[in-house]
Amino acid sequence: MPRRIALAFVVAAVACSGDLPSLSTQQEDITVSKVVDVSQDELSENETPIAVNPTDPQNLITGANDWNYNDGCAMNASFDGGKSWTPALPNGYLPGVTKFTNDPAVPGTGMYDAGGDPQIAFGPDGTAYYVCQAFNFFPPFEIALLVSRSSDGGRTWLDGVSEKLAKVNAWQGNGKEKGSNGQFADHESIHVDTHPGSPYYGSVYVTWVQFNGNVHSPVYVSYSRDGARNFTAPIKVTSGNIRNNQDARMVSAPDGTLHLTFDNGLQGHKGLAFFTTRSTDGGNTWSDAVEFALLVNPVCTFPPYCFNIAGLPFRSGGTYAAPAFDPVRNRLVAIWPDIVGQYAQIYMSWAPASDLSRWSTPVAIAPAAGDRFQNELTIAPNGRYDVSFYDRSYTKNAQVDVTYAQSLDAGVTWATRRVSQKSFDPGVWGVPSSNAQGFRPFIGDYNGQYSTNSSVGIAWTGVSAPAPLNLDIDFAAVTP
């Protein structure tokens, strides 16, 4: 079953403004740990968000799409900085979502056939929050966004019986939450305000795009001020009848200002553009969206509709904007892949928080001879920029690895390190399918990353024997 609706994007002209910083690579002492197989099974997982507990930096949690029997949202926790991982109880998945567990003889505590698009965040008090898209395969095709929480670092979560998971997109009325009537909440993300000086400290925010009958795909936000027990009615961020909004993500400034980025296929025009909007009242109202980048040739990995990089076709995240807020320089930063020359490269741009109409000219991050795509960006409290992405430059554009890039001067210069310890071809690995191959090449639409002043954690979809269905959750720690 397809887990989400995806978009195919086409070529457009560059249109960005700002000051062009000089860019060069540099060498720094960067230590990368041994790659850890988080999932340690012989089944497929992909899409791997990760978060670090602000009250205990040794406590990490990561999720995934779980292609096991329960077909829900996977969950693993670490209490030693990622050296070892423990599946969440009862059996490595989020309870209260699916009708199934990973034991065919034991029913689940949810009402849905499947779950996916996992996203995770910690609150300032160490509470963990997990949002999972849940849906049914049969009429009337119900779909919802559900939020669970954990108070013990990810060992246990709401069971779905004594306390139900919070339902975020709780619309009322005919046709709402019905995929058959065009409703489909997609690519959700979660953000918690952990800034002590913010008036909205501890607030939990969820944003997503709502596909509704091919009329419009507005961006929505909902928030909770009571620890994800109750969420507001969905707040519409975008308006009009333009289709193809997608990939909404949110970050916040120390004063509580929210910054939200999303992409759009520019209906009636060619190309993919990125937009940003902000809220200064805790998510209740949003500014008019500002376009901050128009791409030349977005990476599109959604076969058979499109596949425009080297190698055998496979599905992945391709191009999306990953935002982060720089608290040291008071600026909003974003990165994304684009094919400007021979290879797809990762580009970065930024704007001062005081004027989001003034974005710098996009510049490639330490360019190399190979396609790079599916990027993540986090900024440490001390202002260090951390970036990770899939990278084909180590194998003459033949196979895929993971690269970490670091900048200590706000993106002017970069140092890079290979993180993965074995290359793989995403075209020959995947998730279960009823097609003739028995699998569908799909390494997930995003990876995960977190930053502290002393460490960076990266989670991604890797592989291990037996092929082709053993996609793994892989993790490595970086010491900058």
Image (cartoon, helix red, strand yellow):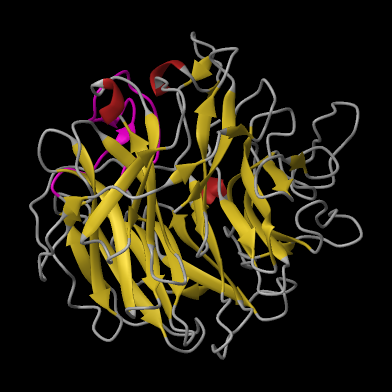
- Residue pictured at 31% horizontal, 81% vertical: 353
Would you say the magenta stretch is mainly helix, strand or loop? Answer: loop
Return the x and y of residue 274 as percentages of the image width and height.
Answer: 26, 61
Q: Is residue 281 left or right of residue 157?
A: left
Up the image or down, 5 lies above or below 432; here it is below
Return the x and y of residue 372 as percentages of the image width and height.
Answer: 28, 38
Q: Which residues are magenta?
A: 296-319
Return the x and y of residue 127 as percentages of the image width and height.
Answer: 73, 67
Up the image or down, 354 lies above or below 44; here it is below
Q: Quadrant of residue 228?
A: bottom right
Return the x and y of residue 217 as percentages of the image width and height.
Answer: 39, 59
- Residue pictured at 28% horizontal, 66% vertical: 410
- Residue pictured at 56% horizontal, 16% vertical: 434
Which residue is at the far front? 29
Q: Is residue 466 left or right of residue 221?
A: right
Q: Quadrant of residue 246?
A: bottom left
Image quarter in which the C terminus is found: bottom left
- Which of 142/261 is in front? 261
- Which of 296/334 is in front? 334
Q: Is residue 112 visible?
A: yes
Q: Is residue 353 left or right of residue 116?
A: left
